[in-house]
Amino acid sequence: MTFSSQFSSSALLVALRELGAANRSHLSWLKDLHRAMICGGAPNPADLLADAHCRCKFGQWYYQRDYPELRDGAWFENIGVFHRAMHDGARALLSKRNGGQPVSADEYDAFMDLSIRFKLEVSGLQTSIISKVCLVDHLTGVWNRNGLLHKLQQEHERMMRSGAACCVCMMDLDHFKRVNDEFGHQAGDTVLHEAIRFFNGKLRKYDAIFRYGGEEFLFCLPNAEVPDVVNTMQRLCAELAAHPIDLGNNGIVHITASFGIAAMTPDETVEDSIEKADNALFCAKASGRNQVCLWDCIGEPPHPGDQ
């Protein structure tokens, strides 16, 4: 799955800011609660209601906003669980205090344990969001190179456990420098973004795209046999060449790409597979570009300077 099909970095940054604001509101709520418990002030009437967890500012943020970009892990769900439990505990403490009953140390410790666990879950979600933002290429929305080896290693291990095939494909946009030279770098950014949007719409949701560098991208294609990958890439190669990219005042342009494919194997490292795909890409470019080359079908690759 490409990063952009799940969430965008801009949406994650908005969610991170709003989570920070909601957490600050929670700290204010916690301060007011302790003041009421310790100093004898009047508690917030809403804290004595069964749905108090929905009425506080943090709860309003959590329950009234839809955050699909945050729901891919356990952090967000756990926050809801501990937030509600914490409010239930606060209501029990306040009810005892209002009824003139003493609060035992065990009851107070149980509430504080929930409060601390809630804080840890929020911190975990914040760290998770920051990690995702750091792993995405902000222009194209796909994974950047920082997480490439880790994620490919996961696929390699999955391949070894299941016995299913997995391929990697290096893709490079042909003559991309001409776009920048003729139309400017903003047009080049548009071409990169639109080209990856094209591939994102054609590949399977569990395939992964990484920006390897510049206009070069790596595809990870799990559960796919080599002949199927070759056929798919040949089809996409032709479809991309026919795909119009609108540059606004600069008109419509078409761009082609070259592809190098290599199969992952149990007895080779992920780095070996990437190198073979890269060598196959060199062959595709040296053979005229706008085509697909498979590592197993070629001999000694040309030197990169021969492109």
Image (spheres, rainbow, N blue to C red):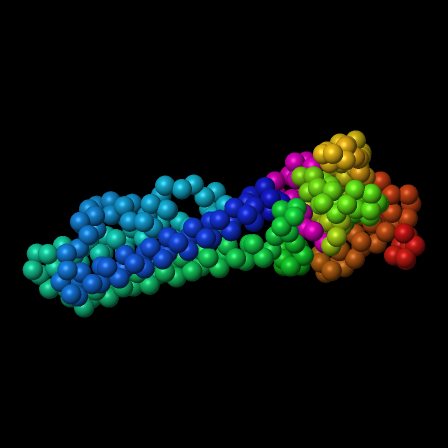
**Quarter where residue 302 is shown:** bottom right
Residue 249 image offset from top left, x and y in percent: 74, 34
Q: Going 15% across and 60% down the picture, which residue do you hit?
A: 41
Instruction: Say above or below: 217 vs 195.
Output: below
Left or right of residue 122: residue 267: right
Residue 180 image offset from top left, x and y in percent: 79, 46
Say whether residue 18 is visible.
Answer: yes
Instruction: Say above or below: 5 vs 75.
Output: above
**Quarter where residue 96 is shown:** bottom left
Say whether residue 225 is visible.
Answer: no
Front-most of 193 and 124? 193
Residue 241 image offset from top left, x and y in percent: 80, 34
Q: Quadrant of the N terminus?
A: top right
Most extreme residue toward the front is 249
Q: Going 49% across and 49% down the picture, which residue do you hit?
A: 14
**Quarter where residue 110 is shown:** bottom left
Left or right of residue 113: residue 36: left
Left or right of residue 65: residue 261: right
Q: Going 17% across and 62% down the picture, which residue do you hit?
A: 37
Most extreme residue toward the bottom is 105
Q: Going 90% across and 52% down the picture, which residue do you hit?
A: 307
| Magenta-drawn stretch contains 117 | no
Residue 184 image offset from top left, x and y in percent: 77, 45
Q: Which residues are magenta?
A: 198-212
